[in-house]
Image (cartoon, coloured by chain):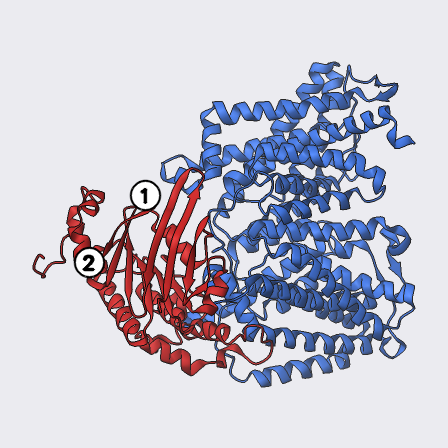
Chain colours: A red, B blue
Amino acid sequence: MTLLAVTGLHKSFGGVMAARDVDFTVERGEMLAIIGPNGAGKSTVFNMVGGQLRPDRGQVLLDAHDITHASPQKRFRRGVGRTFQVAQTFLSMSAAENVQMALISCHRQSNGLWSPARERHREKAVALLSQVGMAEAADVPCSALAYGDVKRVELAIALAGEPKLLLMDEPTAGMAPRERAELMDLTGSIATSQGIGVLFTEHDMDVVFGHAARVLVLLRGQIIAAGTPDEIRQDPQVRRAYLGDEHALERPKGLSPA
Amino acid sequence: MLALDPSFLAVQALSGLSSASSLFITACGLTIVFGVTRIVNFAHGSLYMIGAYTAATLVPRLLELSFGPVTFWAGILASALIVGIIGVIIEILLLRRIYGAPELFQLLATFGVVLVVQDLVVQVFGPEDILGPRAPGLRAPVEILGRRFPSYELVLIAAGPIVLGLVWLLLRKTRFGVLVRAATQDRDMVASLGVNQAMLFTGTLFLGAFLAGLGGALQIPRVSANTGMDLSIIAEAFVVTVVGGMGSVPGAFLAALIIGQLQAFGILIFPKSTLVVVFLLMAVVLAIRPYGLFGRAEIVGGSHAVGIASHKPLPGRTYILLAVMAALACFPLLADAYLLKVATEILIFALFAFSLQLLIGVGGLVSFGHAAFFGLGAYGSALAVKWLDMSMEAALPLGLTLAALGAALIGAFVVRLSGIYLAMMTLAAAQILYAVAFQWVDVTGGDNGIVGVWPSSWAGGPVPYYLLTAALTLVAVLLLKRIIDAPFGYALRAARDSEARAEAIGLKVRQHRWLAFMISGAAAGLAGGLYAFSRGSVDPSLLGISTSVDALTMLLLGGIQTVAGPLVGAAVLHFLRDLIMPLTPLWRLLLGLSIIAMVLIFPRGLVGTVQYWREERA
């Protein structure tokens, strides 16, 4: 069964059509990238899947459940995890406590008034942190971590809810090039091993073509192309959309041209 | 029927228009200053008061030199100009140092100015109210539908639209106005365009203070300049700016019109409670439109919150706790009755401040009306004793329950709001309760309050009551501490640190915040009840702004980032007050200056600073 099915999604802001008739699907274990020039509607589509925006029309199905109008909280319970363009963690807490907080919420214990939070789900939290290579930093306050490490902690938080679908908005924004590849390699291996579908938007074409199984190209709110990275690279419409920035669509260095 | 007489209605509507005009002129300055600087200037009401005092002193002297309308209006304008210059001084000395500070600190610092001005006004103008001269040429009333109506009021009615027009021209047609509008929309963008920020902000403060001064100066033929004007006008000006949408001049105009009429006709429906009607309007508007009529959502998210962070548990904390318990228990052996009374009150205020810490330090919810819950607890207990003949054992829980219910009601309104709107709304809620306590004389005793609220005989003396207070405070503080460390407290902190992240991990942020209000309100209510029985009486000042600010000052003094902060802050503030207040009539001046100094140079507070040193060394 298809993990995420988006059909006929529409959203306009005043007179601006930010999304029209957007259809796509994400399968388990698949990494799907949404790309497009600035203002193409990537974030709009993304936030309609994440629950931050309500579509004017259309449907979002997760595992055949209609989540079109569900709150972010409900989506989390249905198995949607997400990371943000600017990493969102709880800066007053340690890395482990960040993940513990997600686990506490996952177990519906966030109204607990008695036994201390820091003792709950500690082992599971450290295990999740070690999955993203952050086990040593478990007791470091998030406010003291380097940004790349904060992004990893955020990934661990998102994984704590045992998501079926992971939404990543510009996952590598603000990171050094080497960190980018590492983070996406890590995401890819976790997605494959746990059968998690990953939907991400990205500006860095190396990241897109190096890690996505399929790519959607948005232009003025519409999908103008969808396919494997190689198909997208060859697509004349996409080349026109990125006119003046064609080098962005070239193969990463070290690979032979298709 | 009197109310349906058309001439009566007309006169009532006209007087509503004239108070709307005065209100708009003042509130317009507040909203412009907020739009550009993002500071809610508590001292705006003080500027208004200075305007009234200056005009009431200056204009008669000028009229002695040359009597006539020109002199009168020139005197009014001169007073407004003087206030404008005072605004510039405040901007240069204080505000420009706190533009980047958390909004709680901004509110407190400008409230510090309020306190300073209150004492300075008495020093400069004397303690008497000053009635200004009537305007030359406008002394005779006019007849409207057979009723006499003061002609000065008609001039005031015209003054509002004239000021609106002039401000509109200023904002539309001058470079300064363009910059003000640009900064209101996006301050960072204006800064990055190389605009001289300092000049812009100073100019804005001049304009804002000038309008406040003008609003105050225009009042002198109607009401005498008095020392209570600052807080009464600031409360109304807050309502106008919040209802209109903070930063919106047309919004302020519309809101002032609505409120003027509500006050004029509200008097017919609720003769004693116009204040309640006005604040209810604000509650309704904010419930429907969380950013006011013409306001916009703040672009900058709430990353401004400062508060408690995770710390390793103190080693040997069980022993520390035992030592504290022993010290509290042994204190009566050393202390006399007076010291015991002081200690009892310190404990009560420690609990009060600590309950606020759950909202501010843990939840990032800047409640500016925490007195509401303290007062509800106190009044709940006192009313139970007076009207239901209850004993202390029954009245205390009743007060606590009343406070928790009040917190549930107020919380239900405010958890949808954020930042400055939440602060204003909680302040408004406290003011409603204050008005009720003040005006519902039959039940609450009005200004005199309720007396004869004494504890049961077994707890009657200073020692037993001290021990009772110590025990209840200790239990409540430990329970709250437990809650702060529990998943619930962590969830509150999570929502404070990042609301988006909290929602994305499935936390029901509003529900948690609502519960936090109830818990915090219950604790504050317990403190209020204990206070009522320690004093033997309650009065409306327990619900007033100054009680809320006391709690905030204790929090700030002790340190918002620490758990022990509010407890230490309560002790230090109360101790200092008992020490200094008998020595000088300028207590408010000193308190105000101390608050300002703390915000500027000591924002971590006492306990926070010690903690910081320890961590720096480690």
Give the secondary structure at mark 1.
loop
- Looking at the rendering, in which quadrant would you find the N terminus of chain B? top right
> Residue A72 location, x and y as percent?
48, 61
Q: Residue at x 81, y 73 (%)?
A: B337
**Looking at this view, is B6 or A237 the one in front?**
A237
Q: Residue at x 90, y 64 (%)?
A: B386
- Looking at the rendering, in which quadrant would you find the C terminus of chain B? bottom left
Gap between marks 2 and 1, in whole Å? Answer: 21 Å
> Residue B131 location, x and y as percent?
80, 30
Q: In this rendering, is residue A26 above or below B78?
A: below
**Looking at this view, is B179 or A53 the one in front?**
A53
Which image quadrant for residue A110? Answer: bottom right
> Which label sits on residue A229?
2
> Which label sits on residue B418?
none
The residue where tag 1 is placed is A220
From the viewer's perspective, is A72 left or right of B140? Answer: left
From the viewer's perspective, is B430 left or right of B438? Answer: left
The first of marks 2 and 1 along the sequence is 1
